[in-house]
Amino acid sequence: MSSDERREEILAAATRAFAAHGYHGTSTDAVAREAGISQPYVVRMFGGKLALFLEVFASVGERVDATFAAVVDERPFDPDDEDDWGRLGHAYKAMLADDPMLLPVLLHGFAAGAVPEIGAVGRRAMGRIFATVQRTGCTPDAARDFLAHGMLLTILGSMGAPAATLGGEDSPVADLTRCTFGELLTPATEALASGS
């Protein structure tokens, strides 16, 4: 296996470990066990836990940005057309369904933002994503509202609200979940459940 392939394998293992336990709850030893290699090898390749987490978190932010950019670049986008906004939102939901580890890594990264280096990566990612959404021609307020809706999807998914709602929970949060996920409630729940 080439060093590039090994590096990608370690990053995938680190993504799983950080998704499960966050930055503060994951050690380089846990990443090494997940990857089936020695802990010194992880440290030698990445320099330590912080550098490894920064790379994983930045990669997830870049993936979100690339997902939105692909939709914006795919064909003309009318910021007054709900269907175009639907395409953008569906792309985010499909990305999370494709790789359920992304959602918890995002949340753990934002939650660990008090660590200066992690906060800086989170701010850069959010800034790039905001700029990409603004490329639709929308107003800054519309871009903010779109991102706020996406963060609400992320938070509701992380707390298991879709599964609880589909399981029959009757509460104000279930109402919020139904109106937030809409017709994608069942597929979104299946995708989120597969990552836990």
Image (cartoon, rainbow, N blue to C red):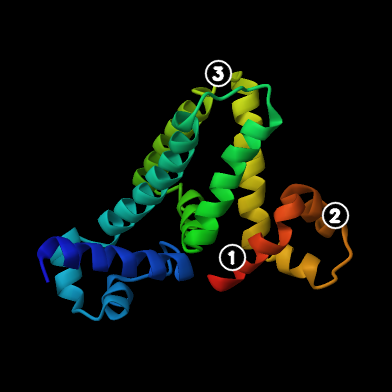
Q: Give yes or no for contact between labels 1 and 2 (Cβ–Cβ under 8 Å).
A: no
Measured in 3D between alpha carbons, the distance from the residue under mark 3 to the one under mark 1, in whole angstroms, is: 31 Å
Q: Quick one: label 3 or label 2, which is nearer the N terminus?
A: 3
Q: Position of residue 90 (x, y in %)?
A: 60, 46
**Which residue is disc 3 drawn over?**
137
Q: Amino acid at mark 2?
A: Asp
Q: Position of residue 146 (x, y in %)?
A: 63, 34
The answer to which quarter of the image holds residue 46 is: bottom left
Seen at 18% across and 68% down, the residue is 6
Q: Give yes or no for contact between labels 3 and 1 (Cβ–Cβ under 8 Å).
A: no
Q: Secondary structure at mark 1?
A: helix
Q: Secondary structure at mark 3?
A: loop
Rate crowding at label 3 as few (under 14), some (14 to 19) or many (20 or more) other CA atoms within 10 Å: some
Q: Amino acid at mark 1?
A: Ala
**Which residue is disc 1 drawn over?**
191
Q: Residue furthest right?
A: 170
Q: Secondary structure at mark 2?
A: helix
Rate crowding at label 1 as few (under 14), some (14 to 19) or many (20 or more) other CA atoms within 10 Å: some
Nearest to the observer: residue 119 or residue 149: 149
**Which residue is disc 2 drawn over?**
175
Q: Position of residue 147 (x, y in %)?
A: 60, 37
Seen at 50% across and 53% down, the residue is 95
Q: Amino acid at mark 3?
A: Gly
Compared with residue 12, is residue 58 higher up or lower down, i.e. above or below?
above
Compared with residue 64, is residue 126 higher up or lower down, i.e. above or below?
above
Q: Quick one: label 3 or label 1, which is nearer the N terminus?
A: 3
Q: Quick one: label 1 or label 2, which is nearer the N terminus?
A: 2
Q: Residue furthest left?
A: 2
Q: Give yes or no for contact between labels 3 and 2 (Cβ–Cβ under 8 Å).
A: no
Q: Position of residue 105 (x, y in %)?
A: 46, 58
